[in-house]
Image (cartoon, grey):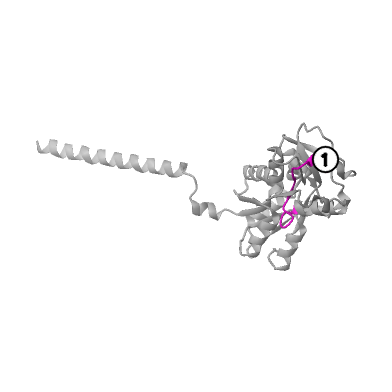
């Protein structure tokens, strides 16, 4: 009887041990399968980039990771919005700007890693419309633009902070149309938003980057904006001080390489350098 008691106690102990081991194994499996904690996400190198490169840069970040690069956290907005955040204390590892002015401001404030600033891409401005629109527009004849708009607005990126809007305002002023459009303009938060809103039919026409024609099949070119009517469109990248991130440096070098240049061209950008 005593032997059976000890045997029963041993079996209970064994069952408890097995159950504890199984529970520990299950906990370890769930931990392995769980998404990274918020703290871990925050530790990923952060890349600030102009909204107009969203599709291309997302594709390249994924390709870079597949090649063994470190995972990155991408944050997209207008270049001015991102630059102001950096000036106010945000510390991304890398900044990709669609406007030299804002990179100049960061450089002047001593917020760029010395020697890391590089020209990356070029772009063009395009008057866009929903695909299948019947009216033709010629910027040489402003009446065709005004007639097409009717009582609806021309959509631009907000010239107060969106590079695409700044370039568009320059072009319209040079073409002598800006004053005639007062009261007939609507502004979007960034170049991508111009495309999306025209595609949804919120405005009959918009001015944004030519690369946007590759991003949404619902829009098409209405008219090319002559490049001599505005400041050349240049995208630049730079590492952000105070600490240089090896992961961001590796990604910056990757973006400057031929594999990335091929992807950028496929998304409608001009590649610079080399």
Q: In the structure shown, which secondary structural element does the residue marked by tag 1 occupy?
A: helix
106 left or right of 221 in image:
left
Q: Nearer the viewer, residue 232 or 239?
A: 232
- Any magenta on residue 148? yes
What residue is rendered at 30% in x and 39% in y?
19
Q: Badge 1 local density, few (<14 within 10 Å), some, or many (20+)?
A: few
Q: How many marks?
A: 1
Nearer to me, 24 or 137: 137
Please, which residue is most extreme toward the left here? 1
The image shows residue 197 at horizontal and vertical percentages of: 69, 42
For residue 172, above or below residue 85: above
Image position of 7 (left or right of 255): left
- Relative placement, left or right, of 17 versus 200 is left
Q: Is 19 positioned to the left or the right of 40 in the image?
A: left
Confirm whether the magenta stretch covers residue 204: no
Residue 1 pos. (x, y %)? 9, 35
- Front-most of residues 27 and 220: 220
What is the residue that sits farthest to the bottom in this orientation? 109
Residue reaching furthest to the front: 151
Look at the picture and state if 149 lies above or below 163.
above
Return the residue nearer the eye: 233 or 189: 189
- Span shown in magenta: 146-163
Q: Position of residue 236 (x, y in %)?
A: 75, 55
Give the image location of residue 130, x and y in percent.
74, 36
* Quarter of image, res 106: bottom right
Residue on which the image places disc 1: 147
């Amino acid at each position: 009887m005593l032997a059976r008691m000890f045997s029963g106690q041993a079996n209970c102990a064994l069952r408890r041990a097995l159950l504890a081991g199984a529970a520990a194994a299950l906990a370890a499996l769930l931990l392995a399968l769980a998404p990274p904690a918020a703290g871990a996400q925050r530790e990923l190198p952060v890349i600030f980039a102009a909204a107009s490169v969203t599709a291309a840069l997302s594709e390249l970040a994924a390709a870079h990771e597949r090649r063994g690069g470190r995972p990155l956290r991408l944050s997209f907005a207008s270049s001015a919005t991102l630059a102001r955040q950096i000036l106010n204390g945000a510390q991304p590892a890398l900044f990709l700007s669609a406007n030299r002015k804002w990179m100049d401001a960061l450089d002047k404030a001593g917020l760029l890693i010395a020697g890391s600033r590089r020209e990356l891409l070029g772009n063009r401005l395009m008057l866009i419309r929903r695909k299948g629109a019947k009216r033709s527009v010629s910027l040489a004849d402003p009446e065709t633009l005004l007639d097409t708009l009717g009582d609806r607005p021309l959509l631009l990126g907000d010239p107060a902070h969106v590079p695409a809007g700044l370039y568009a305002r320059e072009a319209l002023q040079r073409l002598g149309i800006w004053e005639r459009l007062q009261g007939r303009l609507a502004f979007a938060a960034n170049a991508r938003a111009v495309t999306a809103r025209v595609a949804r039919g919120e405005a009959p026409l918009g001015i944004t980057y030519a690369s946007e024609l590759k991003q949404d099949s619902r829009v098409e070119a209405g008219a090319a904006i002559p490049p001599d009517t505005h400041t050349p469109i240049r995208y630049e990248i730079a590492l952000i001080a105070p600490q240089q991130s090896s992961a961001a440096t590796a990604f910056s070098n990757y973006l400057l390489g031929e594999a990335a240049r091929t992807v950028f061209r496929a998304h409608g950008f001009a590649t610079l350098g080399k």
